[in-house]
Image (spheres, rainbow, N blue to C red):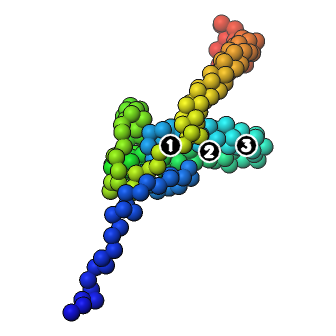
Amino acid sequence: MSNPYHAPAADFSAQDLAPYAPQLLSVNGRIGRVRYIAYAVSFQFAVFFGLTMVCGMLAALLFRISPKLTMVVVLLPYLLATIVGFVYARRRLNDMNRSGWWSILFLVPIVGFGMLIWLLCAKGTPGPNDFGPAPSPNAGGVIAAAIVGPIVLVLFIAIAVAMAVPAYKKYTERARAAQSVQAPLAPSQPEGSSR
């Protein structure tokens, strides 16, 4: 006799073993170490040097209207970068068969740095795990982005620091000169006078 509540007898085991190609802007799925570096660095570079420039120009225009609105506009790219950073950390943790809630440790100052090192060095689970099938092997573009991206990012930061330090030095020198030129505003009183 046939049972209508019997589970289907289809074999899905071969489908579960097939790797999938992770997408850059996906919220779910697993990513390995190389993709984590490539995706995170690419997105951080885009946010910090694309959106920050746009928001900086908007902030310059909005500062005269509302300083509070300016602060919101300036903080938007950093909030976006933080959210995307948590998404990539979650996907990387899922590759190691860990819950994405571990990414909250990034909020703890020293522990967050250790967490980053762990995500960059620890191997993922071979084959399928609790969070899905294994990611497909890395393509040449992903490997190139993982190698070139951090180098370009470090060079860009070094150039920015090399430009900012002399500018800050000139600013402090001008501020000291302006401070020394200012005369005291309080009127001086003769020694023998009393009120």
Neighbourhood count class around disc 1 (C-alpha, 10 Å): few under 14, some 14–19, many 20 upward: some
Residues under labels 1 and 2: Cα distance?
Answer: 29 Å
Would residue 131 be seen by someone viewing this image from the given angle? no
The residue beneath circle 2 is 77
The residue beneath circle 3 is 54
The residue beneath circle 1 is 138
Q: Quadrant of the C terminus?
A: top right
Horizontally, residue 129 falls left or right of residue 155, namely left
Neighbourhood count class around disc 2 (C-alpha, 10 Å): few under 14, some 14–19, many 20 upward: many
Dot 3 lies on which element?
helix
Residues under labels 1 and 3: Cα distance?
Answer: 33 Å
Q: Nearer the viewer, residue 42 or 195?
A: 42
At a point 50% along the width and 43% down the height, the residue shown is: 138
At a point 69% along the width and 41% down the height, the residue shown is: 50
The earlier-in-sequence mark between 1 and 3 is 3
Horizontally, residue 61 falls left or right of residue 163, namely right
Q: Quadrant of residue 184?
A: top right
Using the image, determine if residue 185 lies above or below residue 141: above
Which residue is most to the left?
1
Which residue is most to the bottom?
1
The earlier-in-sequence mark between 3 and 2 is 3
Neighbourhood count class around disc 3 (C-alpha, 10 Å): few under 14, some 14–19, many 20 upward: some
* Residue 52 x, y percent position in the rendering: 67, 40
Q: Quadrant of residue 78?
A: top right
The earlier-in-sequence mark between 1 and 2 is 2
Q: Please, what is the three-letter code of the amino acid marked with disc 1? A: Asn
Circle 1 or circle 2, nearest the eye: 1
Residues under labels 3 and 2: Cα distance?
Answer: 10 Å
Dot 2 lies on which element?
helix
* Residue 122 x, y percent position in the rendering: 36, 37
**Dots 3 and 2: beta carbons under 8 Å?**
no
Q: Please, what is the three-letter code of the amino acid marked with disc 3? A: Val
